[in-house]
Image: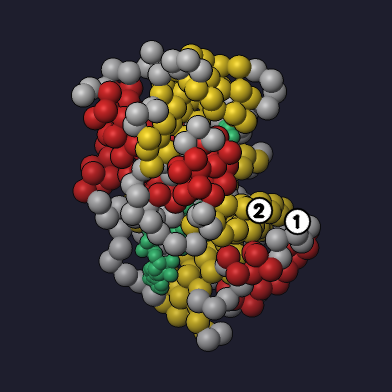
Amino acid sequence: MTIAIIGTGIAGLSAAGALHAAGLDVQLFDKSRGSGGRMACTRKDFGAIDIGAQYFTSRDRRFADAVQHWRSLGWVDEWKPSLYDFADGQLRPSQDEQVRWIGTPRMSSITRGLLGDLPVRFSCRITEVFHGKENWHLQSAEGESFGPFSHVVVATPPHQAAPLLAAAPKLASTAAGVTMEPVWAVALAFDQPLDTPVEGCFAHDSAIDWLARNRDKPGRAGKPDIWTLNASSRWSRQHLDLDKEAVIEQLHGLFAEQIGCAVPPPTFAHAHRWLYARPAASHEWGALADPDLGLYVCGDWCLSGRVEGAWLSGQEAARKLLQHHTR
Ligand code: FAD
Ligand code: NAD
């Protein structure tokens, strides 16, 4: 019997890959038009822009092994930016020994690779997950029904997971209790490259807490000179309902102050509001489960709000399911 997986971010695809490798059938669903979730890109005539996750690190051995495998497949490469730190109005070089990874030629190459030929329904928002006499069934916002399924893995941010967990009120209330922080992400493109050695910059107590130069990332050379900016969660919360043009204008002005070189008006700008960008705190759940029901929940919010945490959470959901399944 098939296992339904709701969400094709890195957590859902991590779970799907592990279950598929164990010989089980999976069927994926996502409300978006493509896979990747918060590792997705926005595609423009001049190329793809990483509008979600900017890079990732690996600290867990299992994830490090997976990243090496992805590297051998050409999905990721190491990114060695010229890093800066912006604090007290000063921009200072801030190199370190941390290894940072990036999808090539775009962040979504990883999730695209993990999806492979697995069966998936895109543009399909699941609104209801219910258990019939013996099996699980799903209902979409478009009025379609899917099933029967032996198990369901919910791999969405917590507030999107909670309504899908009505069959397991304890899991639903755990998910509903998680606070996620918003982030405004903006991409700015300039025809003439900005005159700065900065390739990535962390900032503290500032409206923009991260900025990076796209063309210095592996596989992304070319014109124009594109920069991605992440507003801090604090600023994003305070400006949640600002329209996109105003967000671009404000962050462009702050970027010009922070980067320390002349910044002309952008030739192209894009803003994306991530309502559920990152969990306010880390958790140690790994994955949530009601094994007797056959319902599993994973996502970055079950561990750390990072790509690594999301991947590990997907592995943990699959491990719990397989453990119960083969008992
Ligand atoms: P998601 O990627 O959110 O995937 C969930 C999926 O579920 C989505 O595709 C969504 O469309 C789908 N979905 C939701 N509800 C439904 C439904 N009802 N029916 C069907 N489908 C549904 N992490 C790092 O490690 N390094 C970084 O530099 C970094 N930078 C970031 C910058 C930004 C701007 C953001 C937003 C995040 C960043 N992160 C970073 C965090 C990282 O992107 C996430 O931790 C990770 O991608 C989360 O993966 P996930 O699979 O748990 O969730
Ligand atoms: P990491 O080790 O590179 O960064 C962790 C944190 O340490 C950074 O946020 C930064 O504050 C600090 N830091 C690291 N190197 C620094 C340096 N050379 N100079 C100054 N400060 C430095 O990576 P990680 O632990 O894998 O975290 C991933 C990144 O993803 C973080 O930057 C985190 O803020 C970011 N993230 C962003 C969002 C978002 O929505 N914007 C969501 C989740 C995670």
Position above or below: 70 against 307: above
Q: In which quarter of the image is residue 62?
A: top left
Give how far apart the Cα atoms at labels 2 and 1 are: 8 Å
In the orientation shown, which residue stands out farthest toward the bottom? 88
Q: What element carries label 1?
A: helix
**For this view, does 250 lie left or right of residue 109?**
right
Classify the position of the C terminus by image quarter: top left
Nearest-to-viewer mark from 2 and 1: 2
Position above or below: 206 against 25: below
Q: Which residue is drawn at 36% across and 43% down?
A: 287
Classify the position of the N terminus by image quarter: top left
Q: Residue at x 51, y 74 (%)?
A: 203
Q: Quadrant of residue 82?
A: bottom left
Q: Are marks 2 and 1 in contact (CB under 8 Å)?
A: yes
Place of residue 143 in the rendered image (x, y in percent of width and height, measured from the top left): 69, 20
Q: In which quarter of the image is residue 227?
A: bottom right
Q: Which mark is residue 244?
A: 1
Give amino acid for label 2. Answer: Arg
- The residue pinned by badge 2 equals 273
Q: Which of 164 and 6 is in front in this view?
A: 164
| Residue 3 seen by the camera | yes
Give amino acid for label 1. Answer: Lys
